[in-house]
Image (spheres, grey):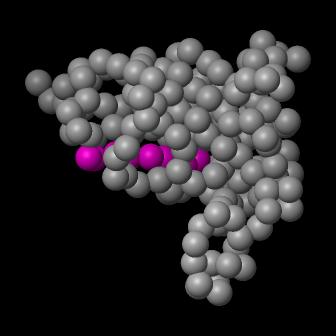
Amino acid sequence: MSPIAATASNTKPAQAASSKMSLTQNGVTLKLGDVSYDGKSLSYSIEREGKNLPKEVLSPYIPMDVKTTDKNLKKRMVPDKDQKKGYIKIFPEILIDGNKFKSLGMFGDKISEKNTVEAIYSKLDSLPDSFNMTIRVGVTGISKPFEFKVPVKKVNKGS
């Protein structure tokens, strides 16, 4: 077993400590890349790899605790144990210096790269010029989230 795969234990989420990270659990590998922060937007991408994974990357499932009367949404409410393994769950948990990051943003397929999703946040509530970001990404069929920890520094666009 590789050292990265070994960090995915039964008691803790998988963890890593630098950008361009790769974590593996139960045959699914997620790679964090393209972390960027310029003071106006914060973005990152996550690539998914593995065998026998669904063609789509993002989970089509709706959490069971969502309150809705929409019949189409209710059809997509599937208990965790019955979900197909390997979809990336929508809305990863983000921590900035250990505090929950609450921001409006976009999370979806990265059109230019197969098996990759990206997140872009533009409502930043005055983040500092440098901080530690934790990204916890859920994957269907895997009980523990993948956890990436990365230092982020503001980059100046242009000169």
Which residue, as the protein is rendered here, is positioned at the far left?
159
Residue at 76% across / 30% down in the picture? 24
Quarter that holds the C terminus: top left
Residue 18 location (% of width, % of height): 53, 16
Residue 77 location (% of width, % of height): 71, 70
Q: Is residue 144 above or below residue 15?
A: below
Q: Nearer the viewer, residue 38 or 96?
A: 96
Q: Is residue 155 left or right of residue 90?
A: left
How many numbered discs? 0
Asked if one can make out residue 154 in the rendered structure from this viewpoint, the answer is yes
Residue 89 location (% of width, % of height): 63, 52
Q: Is residue 66 magenta?
A: no
| Span colored in magenta | 116-123
Asked if one can make out residue 110 in the rendered structure from this viewpoint, the answer is no
Residue at 34% across / 52% down in the picture? 104
Quarter that holds the N terminus: top right
Q: Is residue 72 above or below residue 11?
A: below
Q: Is residue 103 left or right of residue 47?
A: left
